Image: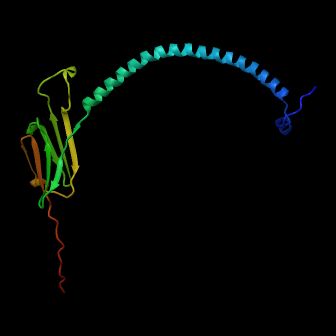
């Protein structure tokens, strides 16, 4: 006796028996495929574990090289000087805290519109890196270049240091005011 088709079977034209046969065949194929996939995964895991152990050694060596490169880069880098720049009616004033640096270890170079301050802060005692609790002070070469907001008279610039504060006074160049020229008749 045949089973009466369901609404879904009438609608799609499919029967449950056909789809059940297809599903059981697919199950058999997928089971075989799963075994093959599991075997391949196990092989890949074995190969990967061998690579990982060799890569760990390579990574340790490359990490050591990178940390050495970083230390070299840090040794070559310059610190940036902190400054205040303001103006008075007649001059531009630059102030900077440069404690621990002798005036002869500071180099100031200028053009009409730019000033560069360079120096080197030397450690007065050698302490091991692992002996520090905090190390916030910068030791070594430093520099700072500033583009000035107005032209200055380079020849009349003055610099002084008092209580570890460098003060540079740069006289402004007086702008030539517009002058009327009268025309003479010949």
Q: Is residue 1 above or below residue 79?
A: above
- Describe residue 87's horizontal placement relative to residue 4 as left or right: left
| Image spot of residue 182 (x, y percent) | 17, 81
Which of the pair 156/123 is nearer the observer? 123
Q: In this view, does 11 lie above or below 86?
A: above
Q: In this view, does 63 lie above or below 137?
A: above
Q: Which residue lies furthest to the right in this view?
A: 1
Which of the pair 51/106 is nearer the observer? 51
Res 132 → quadrant? top left
Q: Residue at x 33, y 24 (%)?
A: 67
Q: In this view, does 182 lie above or below 105?
A: below
Q: Which residue is drawn at 31% across and 28% down?
A: 70
- Describe residue 69's horizontal placement relative to residue 7 as left or right: left
Q: Which color scheme is applied? A: rainbow
| Image spot of residue 79 (x, y percent) | 22, 37
Q: Which residue lies furthest to the bottom in this view?
A: 185
Res 8 → quadrant? top right
Which of the pair 12/76 is nearer the observer? 12
Quadrant where the N terminus is found in the figure: top right
Q: Which residue is drawn at 42% across and 15% down?
A: 57
Quadrant where the C terminus is found in the figure: bottom left
Res 7 → quadrant? top right
**For the image shown, how many numbered marks are present on the structure?**
0
| Image spot of residue 71 (x, y percent) | 28, 26
């Amino acid at each position: 006796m045949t089973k009466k088709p369901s609404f879904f079977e009438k609608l799609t034209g499919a029967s449950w028996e056909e789809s059940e046969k297809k599903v059981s065949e697919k199950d058999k194929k997928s089971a075989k495929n799963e075994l093959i996939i599991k075997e391949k995964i196990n092989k890949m895991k074995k190969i990967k574990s061998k690579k990982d152990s060799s890569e760990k050694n390579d990574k340790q060596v490359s990490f050591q090289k990178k940390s050495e490169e970083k230390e070299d880069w840090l040794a070559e880098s310059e610190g940036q000087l902190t400054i205040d720049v303001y103006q008075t009616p007649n001059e531009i004033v630059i102030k900077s805290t440069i404690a621990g640096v002798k005036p002869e270890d500071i180099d100031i170079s200028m053009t009409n519109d730019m000033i560069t301050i360079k120096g080197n802060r030397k450690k007065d005692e050698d302490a091991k890196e692992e002996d520090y609790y905090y190390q916030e002070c910068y030791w070594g070469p430093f520099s700072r270049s500033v583009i000035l907001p107005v032209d200055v008279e380079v020849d009349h610039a003055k610099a002084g240091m008092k209580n570890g504060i460098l003060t540079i006074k740069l006289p402004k160049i007086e702008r030539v005011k517009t002058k009327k020229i009268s025309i003479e008749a010949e």
